[in-house]
Image: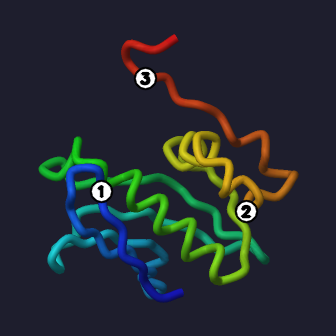
Amino acid sequence: MGGVERRAHAGLQITVADNADDNKFEARVDGQLVGWQPYRRYQTHIVLMHTEVDPSWRERGISSAMIDGVLTLIRSAGVSVAPYCKLTSDYILRHPEYRDLVPDQYQALLRPISRPGTR
């Protein structure tokens, strides 16, 4: 699927790429692995399992930038998404431009996550 560049809200330049050998998308800053999102292929869908960011890199917007890059890569590959990852599900709800990637049978997986200080 290749790779894309994204900028996190902390100004970090992130490269998001598909590591097909390990079935995961990876986010790197200056070549250093800072986040990953394992997946499974199922027919014409990519099942996104969960999003992980190295603890020393958290709170810098890496997960959002990585998810945006992953969804862009999936769109360019012409496949759809089954967002079992809660963060990805929430991201798609907040960014409806990606909602068309989720087939009808997986729309029920789209749920917001609770955030501190919000109702």
Residue 44 x, y percent position in the rendering: 77, 76
Q: How crowded is the residue under tag 1: few (<14 C-alpha within 10 Å), some, or many (20+)? A: some
State the quadrant of the N terminus: bottom right
Sequence-wise, which precedes: disc 3 or disc 1?
1
Secondary element under disc 3, as helix, strand or loop, is loop
Quadrant in which residue 8 is drawn: bottom left
Residue highlighted by disc 2: 101
Question: Splitting the image into 4 quarters, where does residue 66 fall?
Answer: bottom left
User: Which quadrant of the figure has residue 81?
Assistant: bottom right
Compared with 13, 119 (above or below) is above
Check disc 2 and give the amino acid type.
Leu
Residue 113 location in percent, x, y?
A: 52, 29
The alpha-carbon separation of the residues under discs 2 and 1 comes to 22 Å
Q: Report the colour scheme.
A: rainbow
Hey, what amino acid is under mark 3? Arg
Looking at the image, is 98 positioned above or below residue 24? above
Residue 82 location, x and y as percent? 69, 58
- Outermost residue on the right side: it is 104
Q: Residue at x 65, y 69 (%)?
A: 46
Distance of label 3 from label 2 (alpha carbons): 25 Å
Q: Which residue is mark 3?
A: 115
Q: Residue at x 42, y 79 (%)?
A: 4
Nearer the N terminus, badge 2 or badge 1?
1
Query: Can you tell which mark lies on residue 8?
Result: 1
Nearer the camera: disc 2 or disc 1: 1
Eye-nearest disc, 3 or 1: 1
Q: CA distance from mark 3 to mark 1?
A: 19 Å
Where in the figure is residue 15, as x and y percent of width and height?
32, 75
